[in-house]
Amino acid sequence: MAHILVAEDEPTVRNFVARALTLSGHTARAVEDGQRALEALAEEPFDLLLSDIVMPEVDGIALALKASADWPEMRILLMSGYAHERQRAHNLDLLAHAVLPKPFDLATLRETVDAALAGGAVDAILRRRAI
């Protein structure tokens, strides 16, 4: 299973995601903003970064730009409840594998993370789930 870094400023979402990933067999480290995520990335290797886009200090887009440059082999998923932020992130699809729209359910989270880790077509999963 994978070692996943979760960067999310909303405590309930952060805890839900970290717990869901752990229950799926992954190890998860959860931090409350992009600055803390950069610190965590410097401390230990991760297979996947799952980050909110809108966060204080360092937002998810800036975090994804830095993470993709410094750790190019790490998979990156972004998440957002704001449509305009999701569109902004889709313009960066060379660094993020997909943008997970909030709110999402447990099954969508698990399937999206598993597909990203496997190098699969994450956007197809999200389109199918939206129908």
Image: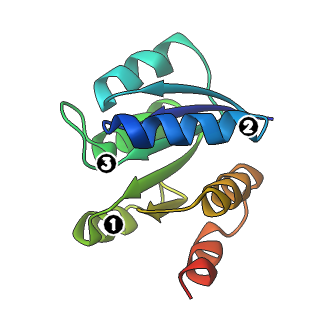
Q: CA distance from mark 2 to mark 1?
A: 27 Å
Q: CA distance from mark 3 to mark 1?
A: 10 Å
Query: Is 38 situated above or below 118?
Result: above
Q: Nearer the viewer, residue 88 or 70?
A: 88
Residue 67 coordinates in the image, percent (x, y): 44, 35
Query: Looking at numbered disc 1 in the image, what kind of residue is underneath it?
Result: Arg
Q: Residue at x 42, y 55 (%)?
A: 79
Q: Which residue is mark 3?
A: 61
Number of dots carrying numbers: 3
Q: Secondary structure at mark 2?
A: helix
**Residue 48 bears which disc, if any?**
none
Q: What is the quadrant of the C terminus in the image?
A: bottom right
Q: What is the quadrant of the N terminus in the image?
A: top right
Q: Which residue is mark 1?
A: 86
- Residue 123 sits in quarter: bottom right
Query: Looking at numbered disc 3 in the image, what kind of residue is underneath it?
Result: Ile
Residue 52 coordinates in the image, percent (x, y): 37, 47
**Residue 23 bears which disc, if any?**
2
Q: Note whether residue 93 is visible.
A: no
Residue found at the very far bottom of the displayed protein = 131
Q: Secondary structure at mark 1?
A: helix
Q: Residues within 10 Å of mark 1 (few under 14, many from 20)?
A: some
Query: Looking at numbered disc 2 in the image, what kind of residue is underneath it?
Result: Leu
Residue found at the very far left of the displayed protein = 57
Residue 76 coordinates in the image, percent (x, y): 53, 47
Give the side of residue 98 with respect to residue 9, left or right: right
Q: Note whether residue 98 is visible.
A: yes
- Residue 21 sits in quarter: top right
